[in-house]
C-alpha cells in the first residue's frame, strides 16, 4: 500500500506575516530567468513510448496475421475408404504423441481431437505399443479401441483351460483352414509319438496330448504344419514347467501325467486366485487319499463330466456310469480335461498345507469359495 505523506508547510508554526514574506519571495522568483539552472528534461519517456507503440502495433499485426492464417488453413484431408495407413506406437508413448502420428497419417482431423477423446474415456495408460494398420473411414472410437486391444499379429492366443478340441478349432480358424481341425487333432492324438523328445510325456502312453498343449500366444508362420505347431506348444510346456518341483504329487503316488490330469481339474474348478487354486488342489488330494470311504465319496467334480458331455451336466449325467464321471468312478479321469495354467500346475505341486487333511468339500458362488471339513458343514452352506 502507498505510504501516507505528511504535508510540509512553509514554517512549523505558520502565521500571517510568514505567509506574506513567502508569497512575496515567490512572486519575485517567478520573474527571474531560471532556465539555465533548471534540469533538462530526459528524452527517455519519449523513446520508451515510441518503442512501446511499435511493439503494440507489431503484436496486433502478428495476431491478425495468425488469425488470418488459422482461418484460411486447409483442414486435414482424411484417408478415403480403400486407402490404408500404418502407424507405429512406441513403448511409453502418450496420447498426445500418438495423436500427432495419427494426424500426420490423415486418420484423424487433429491430434487434439484424439487426445480429448482418449481423456474422456480415461484410457491414456491403456494404449498399447506396436504397429497398426488402419483403413480409411475408420472412426475415432474404433482407432482407440484397436489401440487398447493391441496390434494384430500373426499369433493366435490359446487361453488357459482350453480343451484339445478348442485348440484345434482355434488353430484352424487362424490359419483359415490350412491346418484343419482334423489335421491338428490327428497330430495330437498319440503322445507316444513325441515321448522320445519330451521326457514329461514318459507316462502319457498313447493317450492324446490333452493337457500338455500349453496355453500361450504363438507365432504361426505360413509354412507351419500341424506337427510344428504341436511341437511349439510342447516346447512351451517344457519351458514353463522347468522350475516346477513334482516331488509332492509323486510322493502321493502320482506321475507327471497324473499331476497334469489333476491340474486340469483344478483349472476348471477354481478361480484365478492362487490361494484358492492351492486350497482346491488340497481338497482333491484329501479326496484321493480317502477313495472308497463312503463318508467322503470320490472326487465328485462336475467338470470332468462337462468335458465328456460338452455342456454343464445335469445331476443325472454326473452320476451316470461313464468314463469321466468322478462320482461313479474312483480316482482321476482317464485323461486331462483341458490345458491347465502354470498356476494350476503350481497348485498341484504345492497344495495349501493348512488345508491338507482338513477340508474335503468346497462350494463356490461366483468368486466366493466355501471350504468345509464334513458333509454336514458342506450342506449348511446351501441353507
Image (spheres, grey):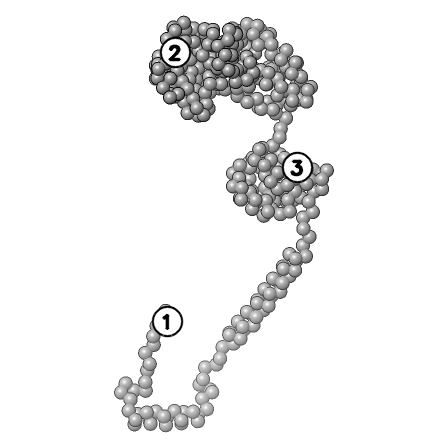
- Please tell me which residue is depicted at 63% across the width and 35% down the height of the picture: 132
Q: Position of residue 297 (x, y in %)?
A: 41, 9
Within 10 Å of disc 3 (Cα), the crowding (few <14, some 14-19, many 20+) is some
Q: In the image, residue 294 lies at what x, y percent?
A: 39, 6
Image check: 260 left or right of 147?
left
Quarter of the rendering occupied by the C terminus: top left
Left or right: 194 with respect to 262? right
Marks 1 and 2 in Cβ contact (< 8 Å):
no
First in sequence: mark 1 vs mark 2:
1
Q: Position of residue 190 (x, y in %)?
A: 59, 8
Residue 2 numbered tag: 1
Report the Cα–Cα distance between label 3 and label 1: 66 Å
Mark 3 or mark 2: which comes first in sequence? Answer: 3
For residue 8, above or below residue 250? below
Mark 2, other Cα within 10 Å: few <14 / some 14–19 / many ≥20: many
Distance, label 1 to label 2, CA atoms, is: 89 Å
Q: Which residue is mark 2?
A: 286
Q: Say above or below: 127 vs 17.
A: above
Viewer-nearest residue: 11 or 33: 11
Q: Which residue is mark 3?
A: 134
Q: Are marks 3 and 2 in contact (CB under 8 Å)?
A: no
Is residue 374 found left or right of 334 in the rendered image?
left
Q: Is residue 243 visible?
A: no
Question: Mark 3: which secondary structure?
Answer: strand
| In contact (CB < 8 Å): disc 3 and disc 1 | no
Q: Nearer the viewer, mark 1 or mark 2?
A: 2
Amino acid at each position: 500500500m502507498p505510504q501516507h505523506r505528511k504535508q510540509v508547510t512553509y514554517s512549523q508554526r505558520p502565521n500571517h506575516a510568514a505567509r506574506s514574506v513567502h508569497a512575496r519571495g515567490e512572486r519575485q522568483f517567478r520573474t527571474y530567468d531560471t532556465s539555465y539552472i533548471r534540469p533538462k528534461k530526459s528524452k527517455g519517456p519519449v523513446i520508451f513510448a515510441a518503442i512501446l507503440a511499435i511493439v503494440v502495433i507489431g503484436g496486433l499485426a502478428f495476431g491478425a496475421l495468425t488469425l488470418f492464417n488459422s482461418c484460411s488453413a486447409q483442414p486435414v484431408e482424411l484417408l478415403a475408404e480403400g486407402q490404408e495407413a500404418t502407424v507405429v506406437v512406441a513403448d511409453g508413448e502418450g496420447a498426445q504423441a500418438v495423436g500427432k502420428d495419427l494426424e500426420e497419417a490423415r486418420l484423424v482431423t487433429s491430434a487434439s481431437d484424439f487426445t480429448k477423446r482418449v481423456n474422456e474415456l480415461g484410457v491414456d495408460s491403456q494404449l498399447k505399443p506396436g504397429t497398426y494398420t488402419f483403413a480409411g473411414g475408420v472412426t475415432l472410437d474404433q482407432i482407440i479401441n484397436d489401440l487398447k486391444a493391441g496390434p494384430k499379429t500373426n499369433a493366435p492366443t490359446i487361453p488357459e483351460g482350453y480343451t484339445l478340441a478348442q485348440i484345434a478349432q482355434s488353430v484352424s480358424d487362424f490359419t483359415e483352414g490350412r491346418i484343419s481341425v482334423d489335421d491338428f487333432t490327428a497330430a495330437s492324438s498319440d503322445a507316444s509319438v513325441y515321448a522320445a523328445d519330451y521326457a514329461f510325456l514318459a507316462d502319457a502312453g498313447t493317450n492324446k496330448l490333452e493337457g500338455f498343449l500349453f496355453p500361450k500366444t504363438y507365432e504361426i508362420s505360413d509354412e507351419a504344419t500341424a506337427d510344428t505347431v504341436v511341437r511349439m506348444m510342447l516346447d512351451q510346456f517344457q519351458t514353463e514347467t522347468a522350475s516346477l518341483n513334482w516331488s509332492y504329487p509323486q510322493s502321493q503316488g502320482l506321475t507327471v501325467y497324473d499331476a497334469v490330469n489333476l491340474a486340469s481339474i483344478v483349472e476348471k474348478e477354481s478361480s484365478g486366485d492362487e490361494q484358492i487354486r492351492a486350497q482346491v488342489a488340497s481338497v482333491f488330494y484329501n479326496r484321493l487319499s480317502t477313495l472308497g470311504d463312503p463318508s467322503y465319496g470320490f472326487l465328485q467334480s462336475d467338470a470332468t463330466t462337462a468335458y465328456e458331455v460338452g455342456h454343464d451336466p445335469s445331476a443325472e449325467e454326473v452320476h451316470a456310469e461313464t468314463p469321466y464321471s468322478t462320482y461313479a468312478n474312483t480316482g482321476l479321469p482317464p485323461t486331462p480335461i483341458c490345458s491347465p495354467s502354470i498356476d494350476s500346475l503350481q497348485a498341484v505341486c504345492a497344495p495349501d498345507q493348512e488345508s491338507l487333511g482338513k477340508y474335503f468339500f468346497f462350494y463356490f458362488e461366483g468368486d466366493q469359495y466355501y471350504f468345509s471339513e464334513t458333509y454336514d458343514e458342506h450342506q449348511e452352506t446351501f441353507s
